[in-house]
Image (cartoon, grey):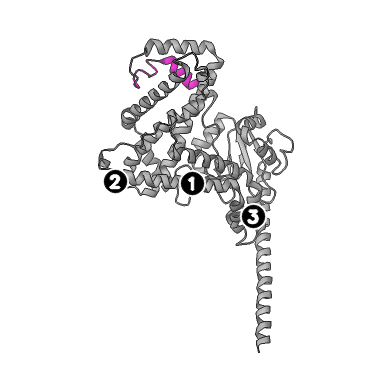
Amino acid sequence: MEESKGTLAKKIVINSVIAYGVFGAVQVFYRLWKGFTVSSRMREVLKDMPPTKGAGHDAPAGWIRDLQQNLYRLHDWRLEICEGRPISKNLGFSWSPAPYTLLANDPAIVRHILKDEFSKYTKPDSSIDPFFYYFEDFLGSGIFVQKHGVGSEDDGQEWSKMRKVSAQIFNRKNFNSMMQDVFIQKAEVLRRFLERKFVPETASNCDAYAVDIQACFFNFTFDSIMRIFFGEDTNTAEGQKNTYGQAFDDANAASRTHGVDSIAPFMIFTTFLPWPFGGKNGGLARAIYDLLSPQHRQLRRCTKILDREANRLVKNCLEDPKFSERKDLLALFLQAKFSSEFVKQMVLHLIIAGRDTTACLLSWMVYELTKNQDVQKRLHEEIMQKLPPGKAMDWKNLSPSEMPYLNGVIYEALRIWPPVPFDLKMAFEDDVLPGGWKVPKFASV
């Protein structure tokens, strides 16, 4: 009797393994067939579009090795491989609709994507875009990862809500009052710091002239953003350590590096392994791969710090006896009765928008001024004439009518070195761009 039970159990195990093998094989075959069909159609739609410049770039996924080798000069590399062409293509894998990428240089095409046919292009589908999957892993569900238009499940309602809230907070009244005062105060802190570096009190202080100006600008914008967004006074410009800022930078770097390194493994896991080991978002295999990755472990450590710090800031804000009088962004969101989780995600996204962009602009502007001494001299003359030492700064005396040359320098720096040099979208419908270029559904642009 027991022998027959053992035989029955063995048959059940064998049959289960066979059934799972058949189930898995059918899954993988279906994915390959579907992926190959979609990929073939995408290649056919894109047949008239030139590939990017580079050895092997005309082959499916032939550009990925170049991408990995140029990760730390990504913007220069992208410019090199598409320079002189209104649009060019990077083909994806032959068995998957990813990662087909189109690089657009023509202003008319950019306008078409970001304005004229805005609803067709939104954030990428994270189930076929590993880079965006890990971007979501870092940023959660805020406005920078929320879809709009035909690519969203709710017809863009959540995105519209987030955008509307942000627009209400970033109004002229708030900017001209609290935000202006904070930026001026923190700029004065930075000025004093640089003065100590560049005007040593004694001749023996010979190393006082070396300073990392880009780091100074990032500290300046971060200190300003922490006050404006969280009501927290930090002084990283003067050397004070900031846990939130360091965790943010480290998480950002780890997300980008791990996302690029994961392109091939992610696509293999989602296509060639049956559920639950593979499938959508890579299944268990992707989870194990992430667990073994030092970069992803770093990402998880940093996001935990960000979450812990955000919880502390929200708690302190709600418990502040003067909560109803506060005008920082965190307080304004909480006063509007949004949930703590929503507020944490929104503010994290707005840090990217407010901190990195401004610091990069200031860094590139100084870089250009060092190369163009005549521009630097003329700018200095205007500043000394309109804002001599001792005169207080405000937005009025920094306006284009008062200081046209300063504003011209800033706008020219923005034109030459845009702080957001590329904007990735995914087409969720077939489209035709200006110039007659065809775009297939699921192509990233």
Is residue 335 shown left or right of residue 347?
left
Asked if the stretch drawn in magenta spans residue 403, the answer is yes
- Residue at x 50% of width, y 47% of height: 150
Residue furthest toward the right? 55
- The percent position of residue 440, horizontal first and vertical second, equals 61, 44
Badge 3 is on which residue?
269
Q: Nearer the viewer, mark 3 or mark 1?
A: 1
Q: Nearer the viewer, residue 407 or 354?
A: 354
Name the residue furthest bottom.
1
Tell me which numbered mark, 3 or 1, is placed earlier along the sequence.
3
Instruction: Identify which residue is drawn at 44% across, 37% down.
Output: 242
Residue underneath mark 2? 319
Counting from the top left corner in percent of width and height, residue 247 is at: 49, 41
Amino acid type, label 2: Glu
Query: Which label lies toward us, 2 or 3?
Result: 2
Q: Amino acid at mark 1?
A: Thr
Q: Which residues are magenta?
A: 394-412
Q: State whether residue 428 appears in this view.
A: no
Q: Nearer the viewer, residue 285 or 353?
A: 285
Disc marking residue 303: 1
Determine if the magenta segment contains residue 298: no
Pointers 1 and 2 in contact (CB under 8 A)? Answer: no
The picture places residue 101, in percent across and down from the top left corner, at 62, 40
Categorize mark 3 by other alpha carbons within 10 Å: few (<14), some (14-19), many (20+).
many
Name which of mark 1 and mark 2 comes first in the sequence: 1
**Depth check: 445 or 206 in front?**
206
Give the vertical position of 2 relative to 244 (above or below). below
